[in-house]
Image: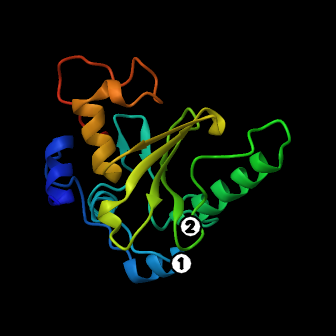
């Protein structure tokens, strides 16, 4: 497997970080979640805090400065779990979803979201977080899209194979001939 950080830097056209490195207690974060996290995610949130990819995908930090803790991975996962529980209890919603919510061993674990309400997640499976796929849950859970390679895979797909990623708006990101850069 290639180096996910080097590939991410290349795909996104990232330049040197624009500020100080944000230091996280990764052991504590991963203990709270019950799993290790992918290297590309750790790199992005450490070197590019408050990152929005193409002004659309907000990458959720592992810890938040928000005193209520509403925007960190553990809080986002708890909210996603509640949302999925509500949907599954609704008799008008489909009974089955293609992937279970992360339960400490495997399943969907959110890492981002869009202004359209799409959830960006990893499909946690196996012991190597750098090998997890990305899953986009769109249209209030009615559309699910799985793409190989986690955050780097989604970025690669958006840049080089946009037609393969069908859950985002067709006119996004705009193809203006420019390199698609993240907004920081």
Residue found at x 15% / y 60%: 3
Q: Which residue is mark 2?
A: 74
Residue found at x 33% / y 42%: 154
The quadrant where residue 170 appears: top left
Q: Which residue is mark 1?
A: 32
Judging depth in this view, the residue of 135 and 62 nearest the camera is: 135
Residue found at x 40% / y 83%: 27
Where disc 1 sits, the SS reads helix
> Can residue 72 be seen by looking at this rendering?
no
The quadrant where residue 78 appears: bottom right
Judging depth in this view, the residue of 67 and 144 nearest the camera is: 144
Q: Earlier in the sequence, mark 2 or mark 1?
A: 1
Q: Is residue 33 left or right of residue 160?
A: right
Judging depth in this view, the residue of 111 and 136 nearest the camera is: 136
> Can residue 64 be seen by looking at this rendering?
yes
Tag 2–tag 1 contact (CB < 8 Å): yes
Count neighbours of disc 2 (C-alpha within 10 A) and say few if under 14, some if 14 to 19, many if 20 or more: many
């Amino acid at each position: 497997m290639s180096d996910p950080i080097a590939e991410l830097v290349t795909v996104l056209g990232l330049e040197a970080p624009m500020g100080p490195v944000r230091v996280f207690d990764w052991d504590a974060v991963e203990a709270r979640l019950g799993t290790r996290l992918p290297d590309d995610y750790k790199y992005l949130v450490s070197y590019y805090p408050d990152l929005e990819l193409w002004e659309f995908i907000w990458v959720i930090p592992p810890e938040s400065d928000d005193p209520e803790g509403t925007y960190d991975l553990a809080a986002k996962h708890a909210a996603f779990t509640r949302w999925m529980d509500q949907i599954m209890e609704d008799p008008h919603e489909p009974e089955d979803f293609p992937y279970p919510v992360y339960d400490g061993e495997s399943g969907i674990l959110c890492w981002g979201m869009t202004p359209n309400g799409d959830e960006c997640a990893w499909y946690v499976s196996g012991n190597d977080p750098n090998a997890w796929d990305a899953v986009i849950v769109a249209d209030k859970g009615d559309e699910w899209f799985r793409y190989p390679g986690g955050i780097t895979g989604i970025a690669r797909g958006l840049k080089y194979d946009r037609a393969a990623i069908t859950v985002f708006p067709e006119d996004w990101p705009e193809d203006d001939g420019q390199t698609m850069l993240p907004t920081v």
